[in-house]
Each structure stands twice: as C-alpha cells, then as structure tokens.
Image (spheres, helix red, strand yellow):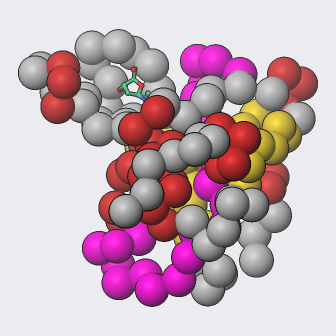
Amino acid sequence: MLDNLELLNYAKQACENAYVPYSNFHVGACALYDTGNYYVGCNVENASYGLSLCAERNAMSNAIVAGEKGKLVKIAVYSKDRANCMPCGACRQWMAEFKKDDNLQIVLESENSKCAVFTIEELLPYGFVL
Ligand code: THU
C-alpha cells in the first residue's frame, strides 16, 4: 500500500499534466483503493468554463474505466499553485460515492511539504446518500 507521501508524489506528477489555459491553476490527484491499486488525475479545462473537469474526479473516473472493483481508502490532492488545496464540494460527493467507510482519508500538502490529513466525515458531514 502506498503511504501518504508516495500518494502525494503521484498527485504532484499528475499535476504537471494539468490542462489549465483559463485558470492557470494546476491540480493533481491520486486515488488509492483497498486493492492496493491507485489512479491519477489532473484537471482538464474547456473554453466553455463550466465543462472543466476536476483532478479528483478524473482520478476516480480512471479507476472505474480500469475496472477497479475495490473501495476508495485514500485520495491525495495537490496543487503547485497553493498549499492545502482542498477538494471542491462536487469532488467530496464523488469521494463519498466510492469510499470504503467514513474514515476515507483526504491527504493534502500543507506548508513545508508536510501532510495534512482529513476524513470524508470531516469534509462532508451529513452528505447526500441514496
Ligand atoms: N479544481 C480541481 O481540479 N479540483 C478541485 O477540487 C477544485 C478545483 C480545478 C478546476 C479548475 O480547473 C481549477 O481548479 C480552478 O477552479
């Protein structure tokens, strides 16, 4: 299983591929499943701004495309343009969809390259469920 720093490093690498001609705000993500498999994503923008895709959702989509059947246990989010890049509300709802449990860990890089860890329970309390 990847540890938090390794996960953040993969998110960093993906961040380099961000397609961000409009915001110039680069985001990378790496999603780790209980199978040990991991998937990366970056944000991909569009001239029709609202069609832009977030890094986290691209990472989770990549897992589905690859046939991943495990559950999401950790996801690292990284921006080279800001420390502590928190996931947006839509991405939090997506994380909840694939989480193993409420202890799903969201790993960020804070100042001085330290890891900050939050749980989905902290970031999306009383989230929508069907
Ligand atoms: N963005 C992400 O990739 N993830 C988030 O959780 C928040 C925002 C992207 C979308 C857009 O390309 C850029 O950051 C600025 O909003």
Residue 81 falls in which quadrant of the image?
top right
Q: Tag count in the figure?
A: 0
Residue 38, given in percent of the width and then of the height, sits at 56, 70
Q: Position of residue 40 (x, y in %)?
A: 49, 57
In this view, the residue farthest toward the top is 23
Based on the displayed image, in which of its 4 quarters is residue 34 positioned?
Answer: bottom right
- Horizontal side of 70 relative to 129 (left or right) equals right
In the depicted structure, whether residue 94 falls above or below residue 77: below
Query: Does the magenta segment cover residue 104?
Result: no
Image quadrant occupied by the N terminus: bottom right
Nearest the eye: 105 or 36: 105
Residue 65 lies, in percent from the top left, at 29, 73
Q: Which residues are magenta?
A: 63-83
Residue 92 seen anywhere in this rendered image of the structure: yes
Q: Is residue 15 left or right of residue 105?
A: left
In which quadrant of the rendered image does the C terminus lie?
bottom left
Vertical position of residue 23 compared to residue 32: above or below: above
Q: Residue at x 83, y 37 (%)?
A: 116
Rendering quarter of residue 31: bottom right
On screen, residue 49 above or below 129: above
Lateral position of residue 22 relative to residue 62, left or right: left
Q: Position of residue 5 (x, y in %)?
A: 81, 52
| Residue at 84% in and 22% down | 111
Left or right position of 64 against 110: left
Q: Residue furthest left?
A: 48
The front one of 125 and 31 is 125
Q: Residue at x 51, y 46 (%)?
A: 127
Can residue 77 be seen here? The reply is no
Write down which quadrant ligand 1 falls in. top left
